[in-house]
């Protein structure tokens, strides 16, 4: 399905949304925001150094048993300037999210360009019963986040066509799909690219407090799966009970009056596409079996230890009996980034060869290269973020801010679940002005993650709270990169549909997603439920050393 180009949007809103639009449009690109933050950081480091600001490090001690004192360090120091200039390539390439995201995208680029993602979305929603159309679209939309940009370009216009074909208002289909793809941006039944990106930033942020903490890409698995289950009825209710009633009955035809290539989106799948989906499904099962085989000694499991392939020590399992089961599976969790590369690559190639979109190995290599081309902007953003995080850590302002922030929260007497709820709300408000999820987390995490760790909240829970806030307000800010494209899709059906119309239609989703997201986050902390395999809400700092 061809990607539509969004024309310039001339309408302007009034009131609070108009102020947000005008203010946000005046903000520079996130890359330049990092440059400004680095400038501010340098000035603050000079001031705090001059004032001799310092804190006791919570987990590091001197040889005499006293706590290590961490003073604020001026970034103009000779040794720090040398470090930042001499190690510039290393600072960039060792930025944790960079490798994680690029590895996953090598495979996802093939799956997307071969047509697997688009065909899978079409197959998932085109035959849904009229009554179950909204939950089907919402569920596929949230799951389609694994497909990144393809979810916006394929599913949203497809939902409009399917709704119109069912005699329902196509704008309701657009809003339901947009709410699932973007409002439920972090919700999914499985971890994926976003988990690799955010947890990479989390790992870098933890380093100022605990140097040997490593990310677990499945660290929010249970939480995001619960988000999917909780958000599904919310999107269903808002679409059918609020939006569609407000829109009224659809009096147009089944296809918008345009020459868009998306008009045949509800056409039946071709035999090649059906065959491709079947082959992709087999490839997914094969990859899953391989990862199980690398984690579980199947022969040993069958009490045939003498014939064990791995000699009792599978590659992705730590055999130390003193460790808890979740700790024994740390190698497995750490391998999931590679697992997603193999999964997307195998499924994409299997689909493409069956559907005819991949004919030679050169097609596969070209698709992998295309996936890397799409990451060009992210590379620039990652360079700026990597330098900001490195300088923030060198200045010691991260640990100083975390310790003082944790002390302030303790003195305030606010319950920790309420603190997490406020963090969700803050992330949602900030999201109205800075759209990039990675950019916001890159400058929030260095303070937020260590601060919450000092309060007994795990890095995984801090990441989960941020994700809830970052998702809920995506759909009401015109600064969201795909907002104009969604507006184009809506205008194919209702030509007079404007920015204000789209924002007004998405506002109920945003409000309800924010309310339920905050409630879910608070309840999760109160109940102390696990966030994922080996990932708990609570965190205990390691013994001082």
Image (cartoon, rainbow, N blue to C red):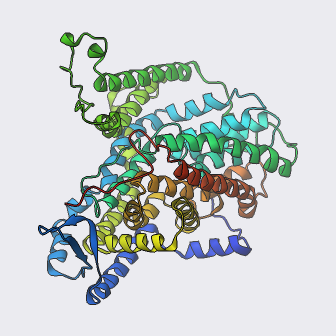
Name the quadrant of the N terminus: top right
Quadrant of residue 342 within the rendered picture: top left
Residue 242 placement, left or right of 195: right
Residue 479 image point, x, y percent: 58, 64
- Residue at the left extreme of this rendering: 63
Residue 72 image point, x, y percent: 27, 79
Residue at image location 34% in from the left, 66% down from the top: 384
Residue 90 image point, x, y percent: 20, 60
Residue 417 placement, left or right of 484: left
- Please say if 522 is above or below 189: below
Query: Toward the viewer: 315 or 5?
Result: 315
Report whether residue 2 is seen.
Answer: no
- Please say if 316 is above or below 256: above
Residue 522 placement, left or right of 49: right
- Residue at the bottom extreme of this rendering: 50
How many labels were placed on the picture?
0
Query: Toward the viewer: 487 or 504?
Result: 504
Residue 339 placement, left or right of 305: right
Residue at image location 43% in from the left, 28% down from the top: 347
Query: Toward the viewer: 322 or 285?
Result: 322
Report whether residue 218 is seen.
Answer: yes
Residue at image location 33% in from the left, 28% down from the top: 361
Residue 516 image point, x, y percent: 65, 52
- Residue at the front extreme of this rendering: 65
Name the quadrant of the C terminus: bottom left
């Amino acid at each position: 399905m061809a990607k539509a180009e969004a024309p310039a949007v001339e309408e302007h809103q009034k009131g609070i949304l108009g102020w947000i639009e005008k203010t946000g449009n005046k903000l520079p690109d996130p890359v330049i925001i990092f440059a400004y933050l680095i400038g501010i950081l340098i000035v603050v480091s000079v001031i705090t150094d001059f004032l001799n600001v310092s804190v006791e490090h919570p987990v590091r001690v001197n040889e005499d048993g006293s706590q290590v004192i961490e003073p604020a360090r001026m970034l103009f120091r000779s040794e720090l300037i040398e470090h930042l200039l001499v190690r510039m390539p290393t600072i960039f390439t060792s930025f944790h999210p960079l490798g994680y995201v690029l590895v996953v995208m090598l495979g996802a680029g093939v799956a997307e360009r071969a047509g697997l993602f688009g065909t899978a979305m079409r197959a998932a929603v085109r035959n849904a019963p009229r009554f179950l159309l909204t939950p089907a679209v919402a569920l596929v939309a949230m799951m389609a986040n694994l497909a990144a940009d393809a979810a916006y370009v394929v599913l949203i216009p497809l939902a409009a066509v399917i709704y119109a074909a069912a005699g329902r208002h196509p704008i309701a289909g657009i809003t339901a799909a947009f709410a699932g793809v973007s409002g439920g941006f972090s919700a999914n039944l499985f971890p994926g690219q976003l988990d690799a990106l955010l947890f990479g930033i989390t790992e870098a942020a933890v380093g100022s407090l605990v140097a040997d903490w490593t990310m677990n890409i499945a660290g929010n698995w249970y939480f995001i799966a619960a988000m999917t289950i909780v958000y599904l009825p919310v999107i269903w209710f808002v679409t059918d009970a609020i939006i569609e009633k407000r829109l009224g009955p659809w009096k147009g035809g089944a296809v918008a009056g345009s020459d868009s290539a998306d008009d045949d989106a509800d056409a039946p799948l071709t035999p090649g596409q059906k065959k491709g989906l079947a082959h992709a499904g087999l490839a997914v099962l094969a990859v899953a079996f391989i990862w199980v085989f690398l984690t579980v000694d199947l022969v040993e499991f069958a009490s045939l230890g003498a014939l064990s392939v791995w000699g009792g020590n599978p590659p992705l399992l730590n055999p130390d009996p003193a460790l808890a089961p979740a700790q024994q599976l740390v190698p497995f969790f750490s391998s999931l980034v590679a697992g997603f590369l193999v999964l997307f690559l195998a499924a994409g190639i299997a689909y493409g060869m069956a559907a005819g979109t991949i004919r030679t190995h050169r097609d596969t290599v070209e698709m992998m290269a295309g996936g890397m081309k799409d990451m060009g902007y992210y590379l620039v953003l990652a360079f700026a973020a990597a330098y900001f995080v490195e300088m923030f850590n060198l200045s010691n302002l991260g640990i100083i801010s975390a310790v003082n922030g944790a002390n302030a929260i303790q003195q305030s007497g606010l319950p920790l679940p309420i603190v997490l709820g406020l963090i969700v709300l803050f992330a949602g408000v900030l999201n109205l002005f800075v759209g990039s999820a990675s950019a916001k987390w890159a400058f929030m995490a260095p303070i937020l993650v260590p601060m919450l760790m000092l309060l007994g909240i795990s890095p995984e829970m801090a990441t989960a709270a941020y994700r809830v806030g970052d998702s809920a307000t995506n759909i009401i800010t015109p600064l969201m990169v795909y907002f104009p494209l969604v507006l184009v899709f809506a205008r194919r059906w209702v030509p007079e549909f404007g920015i204000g119309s789209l924002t007004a239609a998405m506002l109920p989703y945003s409000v309800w997603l924010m309310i339920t997201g905050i409630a879910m986050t608070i309840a999760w902390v109160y109940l102390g439920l696990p966030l994922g395999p080996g990932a708990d809400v609570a965190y205990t700092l390691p013994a001082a050393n």
